Amino acid sequence: MAPLVRTGGSRHTGLAALPHRNIQISNIAKIRKVLYVNQQPIGKTPRSTVISYLGIYDNIRQLFANTEDAKKTGLSSSDFSMNISGGRCESCQGTGKKKIELTYLPDSYIKCPECHGRRFHDDVLEIKYKGNNINDVLDKPIGEVKDLFNDVESIRSVLQCMEDIGLDYISLGQMSMNLSGGEAQRIKLAKCLGAKTKGKNLYILDEPTAGLNSKDIELLEKILLKLNQENETVLIIEHNIEFISHVADYLVDLGRNAGNKGGETIIQGKPIEVVRNVESSWNNIIN
């Protein structure tokens, strides 16, 4: 569904037909942007990190390059990048880790013996921004470094979203491939929330509660209700009855079976209407 709506919205056709179904989606032209959030990995290599995915690394590097100490030593923003030769440790290429290939076992990673896991040369690490060097910013939990950027809205807003959605324990330099599916999905949502233009966006979430504990689900509920208050539309594919009952203001009950034998609309409407309908699977669960 997401590729279909995304295509329709970008072309502003206002109408898109679902293949092999007698169903249409109207008024797509009124949607400014479609944001599809699933649990697919956001990166599969050590080069992919949380900070690179969130899109705030360039701004943070520039803050370090703008310090007086960096200017005196001739360091530029590229010297604070772990993805470009110059200031990074070339032994580990800025990852802070060395890969150990094991026969018949998954690859393992150890701390780089050259930079001791600090990713950069000593002259780069001597440059401080509000008392922290670039590796500190990458290694410390987001909850500890967020306040460093309170006066930089483009960074602050994204990190605040990470905290709001319960991911302040993650570090910006964490490898994306080490994230769980639930963490990857919430990071995608945080990126959308931090950079979004308010109003007329369509968020599509595919089973967002999968793998989350009750506390994280509560945080997710607050974020989604906030989106609704900001005139955003949220479409959720979900099986968690309790979660659905907390956030949904309109339900589409699909069934009755799975695969080719399912996908038919049993009933749709406000939650109370769906629950009271004897044809609804909700009615069977509750009664």
Image (cartoon, helix red, strand yellow):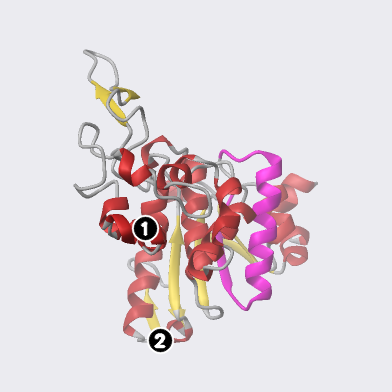
Identified at 39% across, 83% down, the residue is 15
- Give the image quarter of residue 35: bottom left
Residue 236: x and y, percent?
A: 56, 59
Residue placed farthest to the front in the image?
72
Element class at badge 2 = loop
- Compared with residue 113, is residue 168 higher up or lower down, i.e. above or below? below
Describe the element under mark 1 as helix, strand or loop: helix
Quarter containing the N terminus: bottom left
Residue identified by numbered label 1 = 61
Establish if 9 lies above or below 115. below
What residue range appears in magenta? 211-238
Q: Nearer the viewer, mark 2 or mark 1?
A: 1
**Amino acid type indicated by mark 1:** Arg
Nearer to me, 236 or 74:
74
The single residue placed furthest to the top in the displayed view is: 103
Residue 160 picture quarter: bottom right
Q: Residue at image x 52%, y 68%?
A: 152
